[in-house]
Image (cartoon, helix red, strand yellow):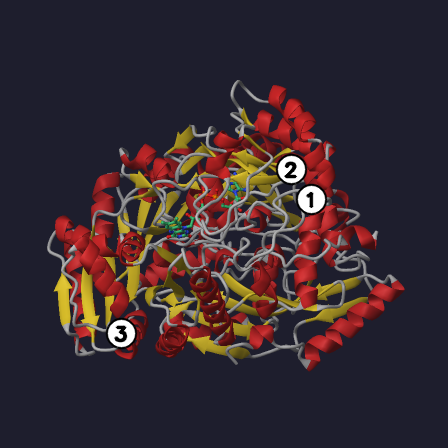
Amino acid sequence: MDTMYHLPPTAAEAAIATTVAEAAAAQEPLWLTGNGTKGAMLRPVRSRRTVSSAALRGITLYSPSELIVSALAGTALSEVQATLAASGQHLIAEPPDLRRVLGAADAPQTIGGLVATNLSGPRRVAWGAMRDHVMGIRAVTGRAEVIHSGGRVLKNVTGLDLCKLFTGSHGTLGLITEVTLKVLPLPETSATLVLPMAVAQAGVAALSAALGSPYGVSGAAFLPQAAAARLGLPGAAALVRIEDFAASVAYRSEKLRAELGVAGSSILDDAASRLIWAGVRDADPLVVGDDDAVWRVSVRPSAGPGVLEAAGCSGFLDWGGGLVWLVGAATPAAHQRVETAVLAAGGTWTLMRAPDALREAVDVIPPESPVLAAITRRVKAALDPRGILNPGRLYAGL
Amino acid sequence: MIRLPDPKTDVLARRDAIIAGLRPLLAESGLISEAIRLKPYETDGLSAYRQMPLAVALPETTEEVAAVLRFCHQNGVRVVPRGAGTSLSGGALPMEDAVVVGLMRMNRILDIDYADRVATVQAGVTNIGITNAVAGNGFFYAPDPSSQLACMIGGNVNMNSGGAHCLKYGVTANNLLGLKIVTIEGEIVDIGGAHLDAAGYDWLGLLTGSEGMLAVVTEVNVRILRSPEGARAMLAAFQSNEIAGRCVDAIIGSGIIPVALEFMDRPAIHACEAFAHAGYPLDAEAMLIIEVEGSVAEQDDLLDRLKAICQNFDPISLKVSQSVEESAAIWKGRKGAFGAVGRISPDYLCMDGTIPTSRLPEVLRRIGEMSDSYGLKVANIFHAGDGNLHPLIMFDANDPASFHKAEMFGADILRLCVEVGGCLTGEHGVGVEKRDLMPVQFAAHELDQQRAIKSAFDPDWLLNPSKVFPLVEPVSLALAAE
Ligand SMILES: Cc1cc2nc3c(=O)[nH]c(=O)nc-3n(C[C@H](O)[C@H](O)[C@H](O)COP(=O)(O)OP(=O)(O)OC[C@H]3O[C@@H](n4cnc5c(N)ncnc54)[C@H](O)[C@@H]3O)c2cc1C
């Protein structure tokens, strides 16, 4: 069990490798996926054949005192979370549940799918993303080989870090079959400062002051009026979360509230705090129609309000202002406005959902400079020489 | 002994022309070619290995780096990037036919943005230099390798360095937002920026820890964090490694993540006490240094909880620091550990494996057995929270047999680390030191896959070749496929 990372392929991995080898020989594109809950993201893949990790289920290793959990890629996130919670631990990157926003079926999210998409929640601003907690992976590459990278320990710099390369690669380099994640203790309790603020710039300035304080802020969001209403707040507000032992949470939330000195501020208790951050995490403030587009944008925090305004659609800010959620008409013009605003701010966008016509027509993530694009092509070729794995998903023609 | 690849004779033959070609690309005195001035660059922190480089280039700007790399690429000259040269794995060891590109003149802090909590610095800024630049505003840069006074951020990025506080704050990879890199073709590329989680492949993550093999880093955007209100340490000593190990499990199991959780075995305690007079208990078999952060009341609360946990393991002594000075005294021995071992043995090898923490007692017992059979002393320092083990193997460099035994002992320890489910290196990198052990951890096709990714950045294998991968003719899988 301990040395599973150095084990030969399992029967299931070998079968997947055979499928990949056949497809490579036939030059036939494959749609690599988990349960398909994030299929709406990025560009659709045109393929007649699906290779799924859904059948690879089960937690293969959990050592609470070593802060490590391993699971086969198709294991439900909810199962991993329940197992961890029973030992007072959790995935600190706070993976979101975007099934509503993505219009996905009710199937469980797989742990492999979360790693493949590198989706993190509000705590990312303080504690890192999924990619920061992936300690090991096994995967079947486009060469039909089973490889591992990393392992089941928390510190590892042996060789090139392919865990990072696979995390967020959206199935374009291989099918992840098993992941090992760093876990951390659940905080004893939490509290949230609600700072009524009408203007995004002022809200983000308050978030910046909070994140620049010594009080260990683990969530910092700004909700304009409409978004706030969706989460049951009376008006636009900045939210600041603190999580820790009870005495610390009480001390720090009061101290921070006094230092920020925002008129009318209040403090939510643990239960209310959990509820509101689950809403922020899952992008509940967004009202998404069937024909709408949703963008997830990352910029420097102080640029968040400007992007929200320039994009000309509705949304809200997380990560201290640096994560901008946007929902709007799925038109090339609307997409263009988002692109222009993000490029001006020096950041990155991901088209999270839209009707296929738009997803096929636009850059679903920012194009790379010619030099980097050439490296991307060569790295892709190094793992998927025939270009059969989720072609086009990230970059058209790749 | 580690073999270096044969130098390219045609490059050696063109030495004068190469130097003449490089000189105008650099500012005055930016190119070193005289033997006496090349001498300081012949080795790094793995000083048992030495090799004079062809020349040393000391660029002052990203454009100069680009010009040098473009020239080297066009002329088939190998390049070894170098920061402060503190690598303990021989990562910056030169090659006879290679130009060392030293980043030490690129030592300016370019921008500090407290609102967005990011600092942009040149690759030659020292690790401590970043914290010093922001400390006045109450901020710090979190990863704190023991070499932080000397080592440079560009080296930290390429080694993915850790520090005593990475249990809470993570290693270098977790504290970066962007890089400016120069490819071997001399192209300047920006990766990331001031935002989190750029879409597309995670180049930032792949470049971090790539040991100078993919590109030369010239600028780094690091996250800066607000310092905690305060920090305080405690020391707990136990009758055996097993008991101390169980206490570590209990601490982590309690839900407390201390900012630091350091373990020392008996030889390490003795060496450090003789050096630092830190008041370490000499009758203990194992000792923990535990540090917590927060306001004074929060520190008290956490230290009380930790004391109560330690009490369950029948400690020989428990000392909770009452002041900043006492904390400093507790840390003094640990931070001076390398120097301390250097006093009892002029020469030592600092190993760096990682193990599942639950296997610590067994691993220490087996290292003890190896120590007996090799007849070489060893002291063990362990980042207990994350399983990163540093055995310091003492030997006599004047006796080649002793050095040879030390290397074999070290290799046996690293094999053991992999055998129990760990890895060859937790933070010092593979370099040349562990290069030939890579097949212990990776299958041949896995190493070929990593080589193919290197080829995607550096098709001609000019950037720091002969490091990380066992020497074979570089296969260019990516290109072969096309
Ligand atoms: C006493 C002592 C204590 C140490 N303690 C720790 C510790 O606590 N934690 C830890 O992780 N390490 C530690 N180290 C190891 C070492 O300090 C780190 O690996 C450090 O990051 C190396 O930085 P450097 O600037 O000296 O890089 P160098 O040694 O010069 O180079 C390291 C590697 O990076 C490459 N490189 C350097 N700069 C660049 C660049 N700009 N672009 C591309 N490649 C580059 C080099 O080619 C080489 O492969 C210690 C070393 C010593 C001597």
Q: Badge 3 sits on which subunit?
A: B
Which of the two discs, 1 and 3, labels the residue nearer the N terminus?
Answer: 3
**In this figure, which residue is indicated by the disc labeled 2?**
B183
Residue depicted at 36% across the width and 43% down the height: B141
Q: Are marks 3 and 2 in contact (CB under 8 Å)?
A: no
Neighbours of disc 3 within 10 Å: few (<14), some (14-19), many (20+):
many
Disc 1 element: loop
CA distance for labels 3 and 2: 47 Å
Which labelled disc corresponds to residue B244? 3
Q: Is residue A145 above or below residue A267?
A: below
> Do dots 2 and 1 share one subunit?
yes
Q: Is residue B18 left or right of residue B354?
A: right
- Name the residue nearer the viewer: B211 or B311: B211
> Which of the labelled discs sits on residue B458, or is there none?
1
Residue placed most toward the observer, A163 or B450: B450
User: Residue drawn 72% across and 58% down?
Assistant: A383
Residue type (three-letter) at the residue carrying disc 1: Asp
